[in-house]
Structures are given as C-alpha cells and as structure tokens.
Amino acid sequence: MHGICPRVKQPAAAVVISDPVAIRRRLAEIWKIFRIFAVVMTVIACVVALSTYARLVGRDTRVIALYYALGATKRQVVGVYCAYLLELSLLISLLSVALGAGIVLAINLLNLTKLTQIFTLGFGVEEMTVWLLGGNYWIPLLIGLLLLMAPLCVILSLPSFSSKRLAQKMK
C-alpha cells in the first residue's frame, strides 16, 4: 500500500511487512536449508576431527613408548591422551566460536548503514547503530560433538596403546 507523503510529495511505504504468513513460510524454508547445511558441515567437522586425532595418536609412538618406559600403565596413557584430545577439542571449539563472532561483527560493520535503515523503516525504531549477533542450539551441539570425538578417537585407537603393537612399530 503506497501513499503520498505530505512533506516530501513522494510515494512512501505505508506497510513495510505486507504478508507475515508468507514471510514466515519463506523463513521456514530457509531454516530447512540451513539445517541440511549445518548437518552436512557437522558431519564433515566430526570426520576431520576424528581423522586428525587418529593421526596425532598414530604419530606419537615414541611418546607412548616413553610413557611405558617411565612406568605408566595402559590406563594412564589412555587417560593422558583422552585429556590431551579433549583439551584440543575445547580449544578448537572456543577458537571457532570466537572466529565466527568476529566474522559476524565484521559483516555487521560492513552493512551498518543498511541495518540501521532496515530497523528504522521496518520496525519503527529510532535511528541508532544496530549490531546483530546471535546463536542457537547448533553451536553447543557442534561443540559437544567435537568434544565427543576425543574419547571416541581414543577408544578406536586402543590397539595403538598396547605394548605388543608398540614394540612392533618401534622395530
């Protein structure tokens, strides 16, 4: 619906959001696409983390042998590697959340004028600087899955911690 603004004598938008039901349907479609993309990216992240952790454990043959030489039991060595990989997972998770927040804030900075205009015209708020930053359940879900990859990798790598297999690798 358009009308004439008495002061400017130009067409002005009287209704900014014309059909809230259609907008909700479009947003629901966008969320479906987002969920599919998020699931695919989460699976890729878990596979990359698991393979990276397996390579780290596989390359540490001499360190594992050193632990055994110092008198550590298999349970202690497994515990050390589980703690090491959990710490690595937590560090990677925190770094990725910080990097994502930084990217979002940079995008906000690039679109600062447009965001201000949209919020002023679309929602009728007074003109102010608008910064958008948010999250949902996907963030802790991804962090939890990455933290789960550490003990899973240690469980899958249990044969690498046996003294017999270690002696075969050292030959």
Image: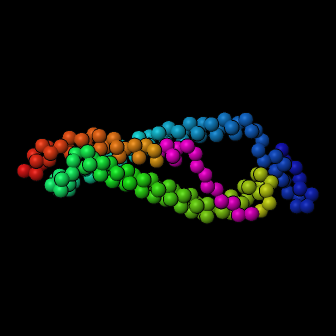
Rendered location of residue 7, percent (x, y): 91, 61
For this rendering, which residue is in front, 101 or 92? Answer: 92
Rendered location of residue 21, percent (x, y): 73, 35
Residue at figure coordinates x 76%, y 38% from the top left: 19
When asked about the image quadrant of residue 124, the answer is: bottom right
Whether residue 139 appears in magenta in the rendering, the answer is: yes
* Residue 17 horizontal side relative to residue 169, left or right: right
Whether residue 158 appears in magenta in the rendering, the answer is: no
* Residue 141 horizontal side relative to residue 11, left or right: left
For this rendering, which residue is in front, 70 or 91? Answer: 70
Magenta residues span 128-142
Main secondary structure of the magenta stretch: loop
For this rendering, which residue is in front, 82 or 34? Answer: 82
From the viewer's perspective, is residue 22 above or below residue 140?
above
When asked about the image quadrant of residue 156, the answer is: top left
* Residue 43 horizontal side relative to residue 27, left or right: left
When asked about the image quadrant of residue 60, the answer is: bottom left
From the viewer's perspective, is residue 96 above or below residue 158?
below
Question: Residue furthest toward the front?
Answer: 71
Rendered location of residue 33, percent (x, y): 54, 39
Residue 55 seen: no
